[in-house]
Image (cartoon, helix red, strand yellow):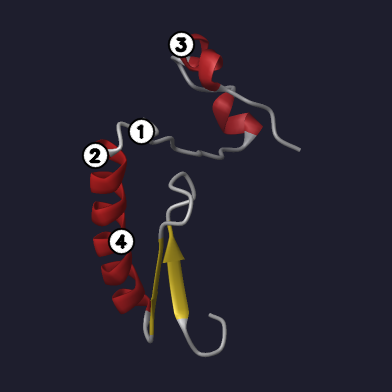
Amino acid sequence: MEDGVYSASIAMLKGCRGYADSPAEAIEELQGVKEALLELMLEQGKTIPEPTVKLEIPVSDYSRLRNRRLLNRFVKSGA
């Protein structure tokens, strides 16, 4: 919250932000901005980025996963 205004954003959609007096209103505003931005991108023939998910789990838990080999292609070490 900056200056008494809440903001919500979608990082992979540059410039996609909603501002309001409460968190719920900021998210609602963001929804409208997102829809307008995606519509504009489609009209302009721009590529819409594929959503990604960031998941952090302890290494000890990861080492116990059964499908670890299948997941390894998605693993990036962070520091």
- 3 and 4 marks in contact (CB < 8 Å): no
- Image coords of residue 62 (percent x, y): 56, 27
Which mark, residue 70? Answer: 3
From mark 2 to mark 3, how far is it between C-alphas?
Answer: 37 Å
Q: Secondary structure at mark 2?
A: helix
Vertical side of 50 occupied by 72: above or below: above
Left or right: 79 with respect to 18? Answer: right
Vertical side of 3 occupied by 59: above or below: above
- Whichever of labels 1 and 3 marks the residue nearer the N terminus, that label is 1
From mark 4 to mark 1, how far is it between C-alphas?
Answer: 17 Å
Please name the amino acid that badge 1 sits on. Lys
Q: Which residue is mark 1?
A: 46
- How would you rate the neighbour count of disc 3 (Cα within 10 Å): few for under 14, some for 14-19, many for 20 or more? few
Q: Which residue is mark 4?
A: 33
- Whichever of labels 3 and 4 marks the residue nearer the N terminus, that label is 4
Image quadrant of residue 22? bottom left
- 4 and 1 marks in contact (CB < 8 Å): no
From mark 1 to mark 2, how far is it between C-alphas?
Answer: 8 Å
Q: Nearer the viewer, residue 8 or 16?
A: 16
Please name the amino acid that badge 2 sits on. Glu
